[in-house]
Image (cartoon, rainbow, N blue to C red):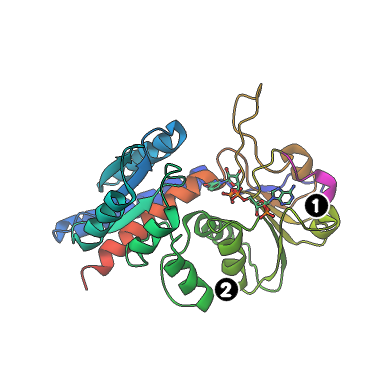
Amino acid sequence: MSQAPLLLDGRTLSKTIRAELKTRVADLRAKGIVPRIEAVVAAQDPASLAYVAMKRKWAAGLGMESGEFAVTDQVSQAEVEDHVARLNADPRVHGVLVQHPLPKHLNEAAVLDVLGAEKDVDGITPASLGRLTAGLPGFRCATPLGITLLLERYGIDCLGRHAVVIGRSNILGKPMALMLLERHATVTIAHSRTRDLPDLVRTADLVVAAVGRPELVKGDWIKPGAVVVDAGYNKVEGRTHDVGDCDYEACAAVASAITPVPGGVGPMTVASLLKNTVDAAERSLS
Ligand code: NAP
């Protein structure tokens, strides 16, 4: 592409979405409902604590309330599950976020099973993923939801397009593929055992990189005019900010649209989480 690609600016769009949410939160508060999100997070994981702190700060900025259970290495599986069960039963709580990863001694899948679908605003429990797979309503996983909002608001139609999703995690690659399928894309999921990944990616009209390998996707993998969404953020020594899974400059030179890192998918994930929580609070009115 000789023209500069369309920048899919998640930072700016997340501000717009937050402004919309702020109005909805004010309406809810006027009706006596304060949307509330509760986080369960590993106490000894500085990155997880920082993510949760940022999510709570954004929530507060919208007039929402939030709480946090910092899980130390001394907290038992039963205690975490009891806590989640209490949050499930508490009508003041609309959403629960189990920040991955929990401390290693805990069985995270069992905690997510206790949470179930009703307050799973991150959309990562087996119950929520099952609803997505079955095409039933439910909370959609926050990161892929953020990506679909980004595509929709920038007028990128997925219908009939070949989407290649690189990565098959339960929180990103798999739900992303299913959500693109919901939008009528023809979807291929690639992973670490995929053969000839560069050639496969060259067939894509839309590429979603969800890998966790800095700059894995090269410019010459991208079909001219394809849309490139980079969900990766990787710490790389000597680089001042997080690096995506795509070689940004090289991919931007051929793509028709691309997300930056940072400022693309990351802010949309948080906006989607809060959107799901406000949706849940509105639902509690009926
Ligand atoms: P993950 O659980 O580690 O999954 C990574 C996936 O990439 C796996 O399916 C793996 O394949 C595949 N993979 C690894 N190396 C590969 C290679 N060389 N070629 C092709 N596929 C390869 O990671 P994740 O949690 O999905 O996160 C992926 C990235 O997104 C990370 O950079 C993470 O930081 C970022 N992320 C961003 C947000 C956000 O809000 N922006 C949210 C969550 C995650 P196998 O299944 O075969 O092992």
- Span shown in magenta: 215-223
Residue that lies at the very extreme toward the left in this rendered image: 32
SS under mark 1: loop
Evaluate whether residue 112 shows in this view. Answer: yes
Compared with 230, 179 (above or below) is: below
Q: Amino acid at mark 2?
A: Glu
Residue drawn at point x = 46 percent, y = 64 percent = 140
Magenta span: predominant SS is loop
- Mark 2 — residue? 182
Q: Left or right: 193 with respect to 30?
A: right
Residue drawn at point x = 41 percent, y = 48 percent = 106
Dot label at residue 222: 1
Compared with 175, 216 (above or below) is: above
Real-space CA distance between mark 1 and mark 2, rounded to the nearest whole angstrom: 24 Å
In percent of width and height, residue 78 lies at 29, 53
In percent of width and height, residue 269 lies at 48, 50
